[in-house]
Image (cartoon, rainbow, N blue to C red):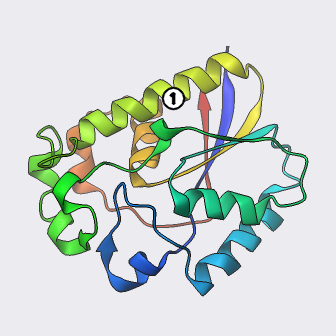
Amino acid sequence: MSVEIVFETHSTTEDNEAGRATGWLGGRLSAAGRRQAAELGERRRDDGITAVFSSDLARARETVELAFQGSSVPILFDWRLRECDYGEENGAAVERVRAELHRRLTEPFPGGESWQEAIHRVQRAVGDIRDRGDGWRVLVVGHVATYWGLELLVSGRPIEDLEERSFTWRPGWEFVIR
């Protein structure tokens, strides 16, 4: 049983442009983000995608709704594909949240969750996608935690390896989940 997952992040938000770590707050796409969402649709509409699975946070919803408006590809929203919950730090400066990376790999943010908890949540969702769509090619739209969950699931590397890697946007990653 396997599924091919194409992963894309949500498009650029007003918070991204302002240097805020949105976390579990909804967020809203910026003008650049709305253009990126249209480009995502152009890239992926005719890419053999069986279904789109997306985080339910507003910025991810807006991304897929713009990208796939008028398309017959089904879109399913799953809260487990959300970003890490920074708790009291949702909406804080990106630098402030990044400075906590090492500590928050396994220790939850006050009022939130750890990166490890977020990654395990994402991996449970991915397991359900795999079990549901044997042989499918699906698009998953999410966040850094979504990407890290996929990356660690496929690579088998420990979570501590994330400290040495910075997340850099690109137009899609592809994973085969068995």
Q: Is residue 30 above or below residue 40?
A: below
Q: Nearer the viewer, residue 135 or 100?
A: 100
Residue 178 seen in this snapshot:
no
Q: Which residue is mark 1?
A: 125
Which residue is at 69% across, 80% downward? Answer: 35
42 is higher (above) or lower (below) than 15:
above
The amino acid at mark 1 is Ala
Q: Position of residue 150 (x, y in %)?
A: 47, 38
- Going 83% across and 61% down the picture, which residue do you hit? 69
How dense is the environment of label 1, judged by Cα within 10 Å: few (below 14), some, or many (20 and up)? some
Quadrant placement of the C terminus: top right
User: Toward which corner of the image does residue 122 lie, by quadrant?
Assistant: top left
Nearest the viewer among 133 and 26 is 26
Left or right side of 75 for 146: left
48 lies left or right of 25: right
> Residue at horizontal 30%, vertical 56%?
165
Above or below, 3 relative to 7: above
Image location (x, y in percent) of residue 22: 35, 65
